[in-house]
Image (spheres, rainbow, N blue to C red):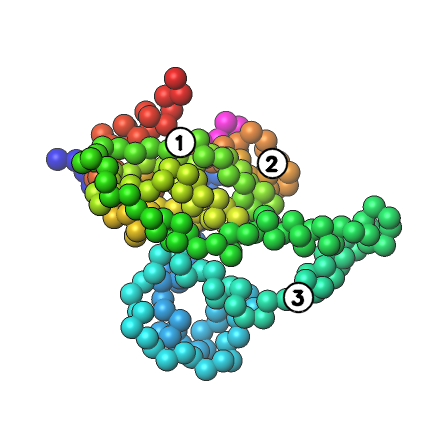
Amino acid sequence: MYAKPDSNTMTTRIARAEDAMDAALKSLSYRLTETEDSRMAQKIPEAARPAAVPAPLNGLRNDNAPAPAPTAEIAPLPASAKRVPDAIATGRPSREEAEAAVRTLLRWAGDDPNREGLRDTPARVAKAYGQLFGGYEQDADALLERVFEEVEGYSDIVLVRDIPFYSHCEHHMVPFMGLAHIAYYPTKGVVGLSKLARVVDTFARRLQTQETMTAQIADVIESILKPRGIAVMVEAEHLCMAMRGVQKAGVSTITTQFRGAFRNDPNEQVRFLTLVRNKS
Ligand SMILES: [Zn+2]
């Protein structure tokens, strides 16, 4: 018998710089808790939340609005399905307001938004945000809607590795980027391989923590495909760590999620990791 891990979240940090290791490990336990808390928070249906409790999101949410009547939709949704509509539905600023905010930040940084080189920057930044954070407009569930059930009984591992992504950390709005690897054992069918890459892209193009993103990818695939097992590994470099704070470049952070067969059987984890690392 294998010892069953008491949590399905295994987060491991591999830091090449030794003194960064301590700091990384320290923040690890903190971040794990935080991630779990925030995921729990997302699973509380809006209607069940007492009005007096401050919303986890910022002032964009209108807490004075009457609570919506409870609906049948009480079952917890995957984080992917819930997070977006609340965040963008209420009080979304206009494009002009967004550009004004960029001008404010330029002045805050110490520059003159009216000088020639910066004159069009607010408009460019607002436009770039549409792309960099385009994931808020996308529904990861819908991407996986089309399941191919005719796979001639194929039920062995499906692995897509080295999916590149670019995201932004939600703490500093500074990029982090790297590779995602996804594996699952199909039961009711498979999805187009490019769809898995688009799922990664959808979550990456939001403000993220690497831990949350890893869990969201696993959540959405699990909820739609109902695989016998799913493994997700994300490795990334965080520019907020390289450019500010401890200022260590080349530090790689690795997060994993193992569900089902991958969670219960260490041999499956070894198989996954071997396939990911074996870049023959
Ligand atoms: Zn950061």
Q: Is residue 63 visible?
A: yes
- The image shows residue 169 at horizontal and vertical percentages of 55, 47
Residue picked out by circle 3: 94
Does residue 222 appear to the left or right of 121 in the view shown? left
Q: Identity of the amino acid at label 2?
A: Ala
Disc count in the image? 3
Residue on which disc 1 sits: 161
Q: Is the residue marked 2 within 8 Å of ligand 1, measured from its CB?
A: no
Label 1 residue SS: strand
Question: The C terminus is located in which quarter?
Answer: top left
Q: Which amino acid, mark 3?
A: Ser
Q: Nearer the viewer, residue 229 or 18?
A: 229
Quadrant the N terminus occupies: top left
Query: Which badge, 1 or 3, is on the more N-terminal residue?
Result: 3
Looking at the picture, does residue 11 appear above or below residue 59? above
Q: Secondary structure at mark 2?
A: helix
Q: Which mark is residue 242?
A: 2
Residue 102, quarter of picture = bottom right
Q: Label 2, label 3: how many angstroms apart (C-alpha)?
A: 33 Å
| 133 or 270: nearer the viewer | 133
Residue stretch rendered in magenta on the structure: 12-17
Cα–Cα gap, marks 1 and 2:
25 Å
Tell me, yes or no, if residue 8 can be seen here. Answer: no
Callout 2 crowding tier (Cα within 10 Å): few <14, some 14–19, many ≥20 = some
